[in-house]
Amino acid sequence: MQVWQLLSQRLWRNSAFRFGVLVLGVLLLLAALAPVLGTVDPAAMDSAHINTAAGVRGEFAQLDGTVVMHTFWMGADNFGRDIFSRVLYGTRTSLLVAAFTAAVAIGVGALLGMLAGYFRIVDAVLMRFMDGLMAIPAILLAIALVAALGAQLWTVVVAIAIPEVPRVTRLVRAMVLTLREEPFVEAARALATPTPVILWRHILPNAMAPLIVQGTFVAASAVLTEAILSFLGLGLPADIPTWGNIMAEGRVQFTQYPGNVLFPALFLVPTVLAINLLGDGLRDVLDPKFSRRSA
Amino acid sequence: MSESAQPVLVIDKLHVALPPCSDRPYAVEDISLSIHPGKTLCVVGESGSGKSVMATAVMGLLARELRPGPGSIVLQGESLLVASDSRLRALRGQAMGMVFQEPMTALNPVMSCGDQIDELLRQHTDWGTKRRSEAVLDILRRVKLPEPERMMRSYPHQLSGGQRQRIVIAMAVILQPALLICDEPTTALDVTTQKEILRLIEELQEDRSSGRRQACAVLFITHDMGVVAEIADDVLVMHQGRAVEYGARDAVLQSPQADYTKALLAAVPSMTPPPARPAPQGTPLLRGQDVSKTYSARDWLGRSRFTHALKAASVAVSAGETVGIVGESGSGKSTLARCLIRLIDPTGGQVLWRQNPRGEDDSLLDVASLGEGQLRPLRSQVQVVFQDPNRSLNPRRKVGDSIMEGAINFGATREEATALAASLMDKVRLPAEGLQRYPSQFSGGQRQRIAIARALACRPRVLVADEAVSALDVSVQAQILKLLREIQAELGLGLLFITHDLRVAAQLCDRVIVMHQGEIVEEGATAELYAHPQHDYTRRLLAAAPGALS
């Protein structure tokens, strides 16, 4: 109990961490409360409002035919869809993709890393495979995977997570290689603790701090990669609003209506920044040796 | 002679404040001392006594959180606490040289040793290249390094620990400082190397070959009373940041006034073994027969290179008996222990454990080549306590969970294990509430007690202690040794005690095995072996052990 209190105190004193948490908190609130923040159905098109300017207030015909008074805070796109609504709902997609990708990459990477670090035979085979995977540019690999699997939320998550796995695996493997020589792990072996239990109880908890930090960086790059995939038309289908999709659709008339690209970007940039700062803050507190070395 | 009347270093009522919410207000409190040229002052104390803080205060290298409070440090008439950073930088090296504990971290691993010494000269003198390199060669000769020309070009990792420490000493004395500060310079070294380094420091102190006006004063920080007996002129005993006793060596060591000093001296184990106990009967609990371990590595041409870490060593431990394995680092004593516990696979020989860990059946089984799965049911009988109390317990698990792990692995229910853990905490003299806490909330000695409790949880018959008291202060060390002796008497354990400290081995062990370069060079009953060492290496080892206190 005390340990956690102390930790949260130290974390909160870190300004990078505080900024990251606040920004992400606001984004989470926006995403969760999107339906009640003056939005309409992000997929609804009203031909009366094609390319409406930002801030205009008018009547909006919804999909079910009802008409509501609506303020186009960020204008409407060339299909007459409300950009504000699309960006807010896009926040949901981006945060979901970020969280799932980080979870998948960390989960798979930690498992493979522990196996590679603890079992010499697995190590030789697995790490050569990981080396091969690392030789392919992440975005190309993601594109190929999405193309092969089809574009859905889970395929996009998997496609973004797989190129991140080798990095996580390497990190975990390196930590396991040092941890397995620690006296407390040897003592556990002498106590006849089964190997899976040693990995789960003794090694993983001690590798957790850098792993959490790495997770935040994976999440940040997942937000970006998802936007890039969507922008290239390879991400989630066009009917799901994502920041990348909105920007891709806005790109064709960027010079006349720059808002279609700039408003989602206004969300994208602080999101990535906040996750990265959160990660930096976590690293400084959880893994002080590393931060001093890199400083 | 008039010069030598002036002390080189005078510290007067020095205070160094600790940050708020520490366990005490001052790291160093009201310390006064003075050192005259050619004299050695040993500052002795246990960890946390503030002795290193005082030394870093003199060097002006205090961590930012520590602020020097009232008091003064005067080096050759110059007050150091008011000196500017640049002045302190100039004084370090020129007026005071420093030698630290760990020579590997004190040296830059990517610079050759010669360049590192040369850098000092470039910083502090306006000499030309030729004169500097001559000076470097000269100092390497004076610290008695073989082949100084080659040493100049070599990198720290190519040298042995003792040679590295000589390089660090060379850097400390090359500018002929008036004061040499040594902070535990021999703690990381083997005893035979320690002896040489201590002698070297004494010689350099008196060395006036290069036109020095007066001999060097030495401020020597150590935790080892044996080292104090060997080199000190004066002794300052510190405890909890305060000076407990200050005086001439013989006065302090032979008729100590303060209770703390008396306790500290009493805790130092003596080199004279106690009277022998009767030899144990029956078949041994654990036996190693010609155990060997060879590491092989391939170079870039694919040729195999072998390192023989352990060559055909045989050991046996019986119930109620303590067998000591002594040797310096790299002697193979830990490798032998790990083969016997089967933490590593021996490449040859037999490791014999009891076939039935619990029962009276005393037939032995060769476990040298058993797989982990087959070993697991047998493992309860041989347990281990490691050296480093900071690393021997999982920092992320509660102490109780660590202790219960072994019992649960061997079939106890959670309730039984909890009750057992509580009784074991009592046995190692710790409160049962501690079970709910994390290792970081305990001191080093307490953690070592927890490690012993953890080892006892699966009712072993043999306990292997791998340097189990080496990282502890002498007073704590004495307590742990006492605890081990009591537990052994109560449970009839066989104890295999690995140590580099001959004094500890003398006190605890019935039989001693001396190892050198992977081989057992001598073994015998402790009293007999200490009194009449047969092998040359044993004799050297015994001679190098830090001075007797009596």
Image (tube, rainbow, N blue to C red):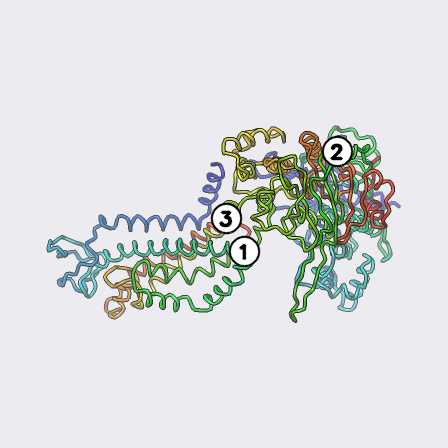
Q: Residue at x 78, y 62 (%)?
A: B136
Say which of A125 and A42 sits in front. A125
**Gap between marks 2 and 3 measured at Cα:** 43 Å
Say which of B384 and B356 sits in front. B356
**Circle count:** 3
B265 to the left or right of B347: right
* Residue B157, image quadrant: bottom right
Residue B265 shows up from this direction: yes
Q: Circle 1: is it few (<14), some (14-19), or many (20+) Cα within 10 Å?
A: few
Decide: marks 2, 1 in contact (CB < 8 A)? no
Q: Position of residue B82 (x, y in %)?
A: 67, 45
Q: Which amino acid type corresponds to the residue marked 1 in the rendered image? A: Phe
What chain does mark 2 sit on? Answer: B
What chain does mark 1 sit on? Answer: A
Q: Which mark is residue A196?
A: 3
Which residue is tagged 2?
A: B267
Q: Residue at x 10, y 55 (%)?
A: A65
Q: Circle 2: is it few (<14), some (14-19), or many (20+) Cα within 10 Å?
A: some
What secondary structure is found at the residue carrying circle 3?
A: helix
Which mark sits nearer the N-terminus, 1 or 3? 1
Q: Position of residue B262 (x, y in %)?
A: 77, 30
Q: Which amino acid type corresponds to the residue marked 2 in the rendered image? A: Ala
* Residue A47, image quadrant: bottom left
Q: Circle 3: is it few (<14), some (14-19), or many (20+) Cα within 10 Å?
A: few
Does residue A31 sit above or below B281 in this rendering? below
**Gap between marks 1 and 3 measured at Cα:** 11 Å
What secondary structure is found at the residue carrying circle 1?
A: loop
What secondary structure is found at the residue carrying circle 2?
A: helix
